[in-house]
Image (cartoon, rainbow, N blue to C red):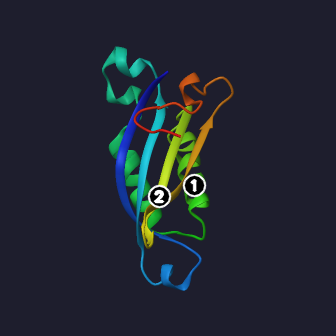
Amino acid sequence: MNFIFIEGLRVDAWVGIYSRERIAPQTIEFDLSFGMPESAATRDNIDDTIDYAEVIEYIRRELAERHFNLIETLGEFVADLLCGEFAAPWARIRVAKLGVMKGVRRVGVYIQRGKAGDVPAEAGGREVAGMRE
């Protein structure tokens, strides 16, 4: 399977259960890897692949309009978006809140989704497109 990856995507989003998290959006950081049709590499046509610019803009637009209590729910939303709206056969998302606690750089979750038979062997804890479990 071929992959597209987007690393270090920062988006302002409304996420959190604490009152301090509800007064302003927080910067959330994403690393995304998702499967793409193999025909994209052979036909050299944007219509045969998933346009990463569209993915980025869609995520930014949707997260500007929604509130999530949990980072886990936000991650699930993005996983569903990639596999549903963009028809990615496999997706792995790392989503993190930045600097939410003193002495902690980021706190977040990994979420992985794929149709039966589409989850790559590399996903079993080893590095996949720059992300490590």
**Residue 88 x/y as whole percent:** 52, 35
Q: Label 2's element?
A: strand
Tell whether label 2 touches label 1 (CB within 8 Å).
Answer: no
Q: Which residue is mark 1?
A: 77
Tell me which amino acid carries mark 2. Ala
Q: Say which quarter of the image contains residue 50.
A: top left
How many numbered marks appear? 2
Tell me which amino acid carries mark 1. Phe
Residue plotted at (58% across, 22% down): 121
**Residue 123 x/y as whole percent:** 56, 30
Q: Which residue is mark 2?
A: 96
Q: Residues within 10 Å of mark 1 (few under 14, many from 20)?
A: some
Residue plotted at (43% across, 55% down): 59
**Residue 48 x/y as whole percent:** 40, 26
Residue 4's place in the image compared with 94, above or below, is above
Query: Which residue is outermost to the right?
Result: 116
Query: Which residue is outermost to the left?
Result: 44
Query: Which residue is outermost to the front?
Result: 103
Select label 1 or label 2 by which is in front: 2
**Residue 16 x/y as whole percent:** 55, 73
Residue plotted at (42% across, 33% down): 129
Q: Label 1's element?
A: helix
Q: Nearest the camera: 23 or 50?
A: 23
| Residue 61 left/right relative to 121 | left
| Residue 93 left/right relative to 119 | left
Q: Nearest the camera: 122 or 12?
A: 122
Pick whichever of labels 1 and 2 is earlier in the sequence: 1
Residue plotted at (33% across, 29% down): 46
Q: Say which quarter of the image contains residue 3.
A: top left
| Residue 84 left/right relative to 45 | right
The alpha-carbon separation of the residues under discs 1 and 2 comes to 14 Å
Q: Residues within 10 Å of mark 2 (few under 14, many from 20)?
A: many
